Amino acid sequence: MDLEDDRPTPAGDSLSTVENEALDALGVAELETRIRRLKSEIVRTEAALAARADTRKAADALFSGKA
């Protein structure tokens, strides 16, 4: 039994899986759906990044005394 199989996968591992998937067997509709879902995930990730930046700005303002 391989101990690696019982460990949780890192968050970035899913992205590696997506990047390495073979696309040759997918049809046009499947590729369009894939693109739509990936774009949606990009929007969600950018929103999370913007929220982190806003939180950081608020914290910087609070601790620098420029509130």
Image (cartoon, rainbow, N blue to C red):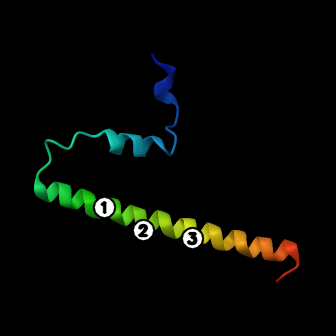
Task: Please state which of residues 18 and 66 is positioned toward the viewer in this rendering.
Answer: 66
Task: Identify the residue shown where x is 49% and y is 29%.
Answer: 6
Q: Which amino acid does label 2 sit on?
A: Val
Sequence order check, earlier mark of 1 and 3: 1
**In contact (CB < 8 Å): disc 1 and disc 3:** no
Q: Does dot 2 land on a helix, a strand or a loop?
A: helix
The percent coordinates of residue 37 (x first, y second) are 30, 61
Real-space CA distance between mark 3 and mark 2, rounded to the nearest whole angstrom: 10 Å
Q: Is residue 34 above or below residue 10?
A: below
Task: Identify the residue shown where x is 49% and y is 44%.
Answer: 12
Q: In which quarter of the image is the C terminus?
A: bottom right
Q: Quadrant of the N terminus?
A: top left
Kindly indicate the quadrant of the structure image that contains residue 59: bottom right
Q: How many labels does the image show?
A: 3
Q: What residue type is labelled 1?
A: Arg
Q: In this view, does 37 lie above or below 2?
A: below
Sequence order check, earlier mark of 3 and 2: 2
Which of the labelled discs sits on residue 50, or is there none?
3
Task: Identify the residue shown where x is 63% and y is 67%.
Answer: 52
Residue under label 1, please give it.
37
Which of the labelled discs sits on residue 43, or is there none?
2
